[in-house]
Amino acid sequence: MNETLLRLAVSALLVAAMIGVAAWARIARPVAPLDEASARDLLAGEFPGLSPDYVWIAGDGAGVIARAGDAALVVYRLGDSWVARSMSWRLALQAPVKRGRVLLKLRDPAAPMARLTVSGVQPWPPEFQSEELAA
Amino acid sequence: MTLDPIKPAFDPVQYAVPIFVISIVAEILLARFRKARAAYEFRDTATSLAMGFGSQIAGLLTAGATVGVTVWLYRTWHLFEIPMTAWWAWVAVFFLEDLTYYWFHRISHERRFWWASHVNHHTSQHYNLATALRQTWTGGIAGTWLLWLPLILLGFPPAMVVIQKGVSLVYQYWIHTEAVRRMPRWFEAVFNTPSHHRVHHARNPRYLDSNYAGILIIWDRMFGTFTPELDEEPCRYGVVHNLGDFNIFRVAFHEWMAIGKDLAGSRSLREVVGYLIGPPGWSPDGSRDTSATLKAKWRAREAAAVSPAAAAETVPLQAAE
């Protein structure tokens, strides 16, 4: 028993050391804030075959909500990677904004909530150019 | 010379721990100084290593039952007396354990109940040596260890099987890297390699449900699940629906939670069975994607890109979600 506990303690120390080295190294993939073109590229990779007709980009460039028919295509940054889900466009428009972030319930135990930064330039819900988009 | 048929003379994984630590630090340093290809996001790394640490604890909690059943079975009945000191016995257990691993791994991807236990290993969007240590917490409960019992019934001593399983686990560690592009041609033909295993960890539709090998890639070639890595299509790592955060409990249990949610809404025995042991993504109305439907849609898009007329004869193009 003592030997097992000792092994676990040593493992925990080694894990902490390796995490420290990884944090020090700063070798994550570079991720630039999204713009319209890069957001559309990202959406094309995550939702192949769909053509979003409207793209909203988070104020900090760390997420995107796009409309494709009745669906909202949601992508947000996690570390140096991206997480993608779809939800109802209608529900996305009704999502609350709290503390400068729109909170999208994704109804998935693997990714329950997306939090995207809203800014004055990029308010949520978006101010639509046409009535068709708002419908 | 005699070897205890029940208690392993050594644990290959314990011996390999220093190698794990040194090689992970080396991969990070080589990437830091641009001498090797690797990316480490420190929260992702922390998640992988915490999962590895947690799997040790989970293993201790379930070891009593798994070891108890295995030893009881061996002592109750086995077909042959296989001596641990015979060279041919080690050759035989090498191949048979690796074949068992192939089928364990294949079932763990193609049937949801076992995928729920294995998925955590695939949740990193990175592919580095730390990812190798992102191990399951629920393998003992999922019962995948039962697949190794036929070897015990055949007569291989439990210690022998445990040692060979450890050898396989240690072998599979080094192939979790982007730093090695290709091994020599003969090696790629016979053994599982970083290239083959990158494909296994990829979520590109082309690569889904491929390369289940442990040590020998020959099983994938034999059973039709081999897919080569293509330079023109880089692997995108992770799962089809990537996790929303780095919470290790979500990593360990999210698919079990999703199964529970689906079972709670089931309306027939067919739905219960489908949600439990159908392929991951199975749904009664087909509204979700399985690997098979994702591949079919991908093939349709590929065909459409080449010839729109040919595409019309294949699977209709649908939304990806």
Image (cartoon, rainbow, N blue to C red):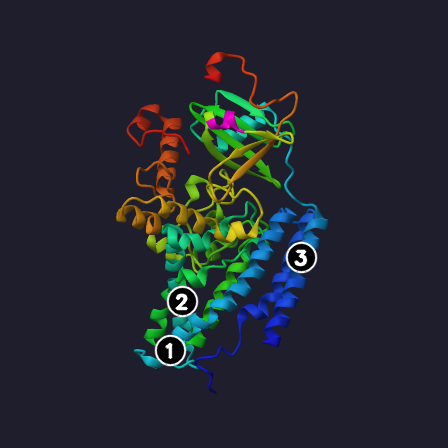
Name the amino acid, label 3: Met
Q: Chain of mark 1?
A: B
- In the rendered view, would you say A12 is above or below A38? below
Q: Disc 3 vs disc 2: Cβ atoms closer than 8 Å?
A: no
* In the depicted structure, whether residue B138 falls above or below residue A127: below
Q: Which mark is residue B72?
A: 1
- Figure quadrant of the C terminus of chain A: top left
Q: Secondary structure at mark 3?
A: helix
Which residue is nearer to you in this view: B34 or A32?
A32
> Residue placed farthest to the bottom in the image?
B1
> Which quarter of the picture shows residue A77?
top right
Q: Read off the chain for label 2.
A: B
Element under disc 2: helix
Check if residue A92 falls in the magenta segment. yes
**Residue B81 image point, x, y percent:** 34, 82
Residue B132 in the image, given as x and y percentages of width and height: 54, 56
Q: Are marks 1 and 3 on the same chain?
A: no
Q: Which residue is located at x 50 percent, y 38 percent?
A: B232
The reply to whether dot 1 and dot 2 touch (C-beta < 8 Å) is no
Give the distance between the C-alpha atoms of the residues marked 1 and 3, in whole angstroms: 40 Å
- x and y, in percent, of residue B47 in the image: 59, 52
Q: Which residue is labeled 2 in the image?
A: B97
Residue B61, image x, y percentages: 50, 67
Residue bearing the label numbered 3: A18
From this viewpoint, is residue B129 visible?
Answer: no
Residue range (magenta):
A91-95
- Residue drawn at the location 28% of the way across and 29% of the way down: B313
